[in-house]
Image (spheres, rainbow, N blue to C red):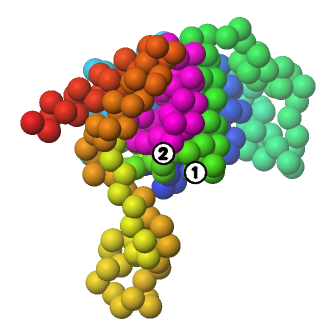
Amino acid sequence: MSVYHLLFGQNSHTDVILALVGLKECDIERFRDCWLDDEGVHVYTRTGGLNRAQYPNTLLTTNPWYVSDKDAPPDNTYAVYHFRIPPEFADDLPSLQDPARYGLSARLIQWLQRTWDRPLTDADRRALTYQRQEALVHRLQRQGELSPAFNGHTVVPLSDLGMEEVLGSMEKAGGSFLPYWVMPYEIVVRQNVPRWPSQRATSPLEQEYVRVHLATTWRVDEDAWTRWRAKFGAWYPQAISAIAEHVRHVQTRAR
């Protein structure tokens, strides 16, 4: 999950807005948000500026209703893509902007359904894998088998059970885990500490404390990693190999 989504969320009508121009969220590289107004459909991405070479968003620029795009301030790492509303649905704009008041025509619903029910694409399959893996993360976190997402991007298994469930999901996906990095990092457990480091300058009673706080050193826990490779390597070779590649990168960088 991106920092943008953590901070701002996204339009609750995303599926409808995108389907109006034949798109799904999974078609869009580094999608952040979208909206609809009298000018058309607008898509906000993290693919502006220097990001464009790596994330060209070809499915947007070749879309039949694509109009233009431009980098977005303040740092131009974001971009906004503009689309016209298909002419045959121009009169449906009030319904799209306020469906509770005006309702949606059967013709418009049929049009949207064409995108929602399309044959599965590679992007659709990737999105389904992402959703399954994200649901697995949430379940394991509730059960105490997986760490919170450190810095929003890395999870650490807290048990053999947690590791094996993650490895099983990765193996089914060819060694990939899409929502987060999975790493065998060292875990630091602190008790009765401020939830937010920025509060440490205030008096103890003004701070919000947690009884147990998990953090990581960002160093590989060699004992845990050696154990997991020996225990699970033969059963989940693609998954172990993928994690091992990231471990080697971290170890090389630390030297």
Mark 1 or mark 2, which is nearer the start of the sequence? 1
Instruction: Name the spot of residue 123 as percent of width and height, x first.
Output: 56, 16
Query: Can I make out residue 27 in this image?
Result: no
Instruction: Name the spot of residue 94 as percent of width and height, x first.
Output: 77, 42
Type of amino acid under label 1: Gly
Q: Nearer the viewer, residue 74 or 31?
A: 31
Q: What residue is shown with label 1?
A: 144
Which stretch did the figure color magenta? 154-183
Query: Can I make out residue 152 in this image?
Result: yes
Q: Which residue lies at the image location 39% right of the left edge and 61% below the top edge?
A: 189
Q: Is residue 70 left or right of residue 141?
A: left
Local SS, label 2: loop
Q: Which residue lies at the image location 48% right of the left edge and 55% below the top edge?
A: 7
Q: Is residue 190 above or below residue 66?
A: below
Q: What residue is shown with label 2?
A: 158
Asked if labels 1 and 2 touch by Cβ distance under 8 angstroms, the answer is yes
Residue neighbourhood size for the residue with mark 2, other residues' Cα within 10 Å, grouped as few (<14), some (14–19), many (≥20): some
Q: Which residue lies at the image location 46% right of the left edge and 13% below the top edge?
A: 234
Q: Is residue 254 left or right of residue 130?
A: left
Instruction: Name the spot of residue 30 as percent of width and height, x first.
Output: 44, 31
Q: Residue 158: within the magenta?
A: yes
Local SS, label 1: loop
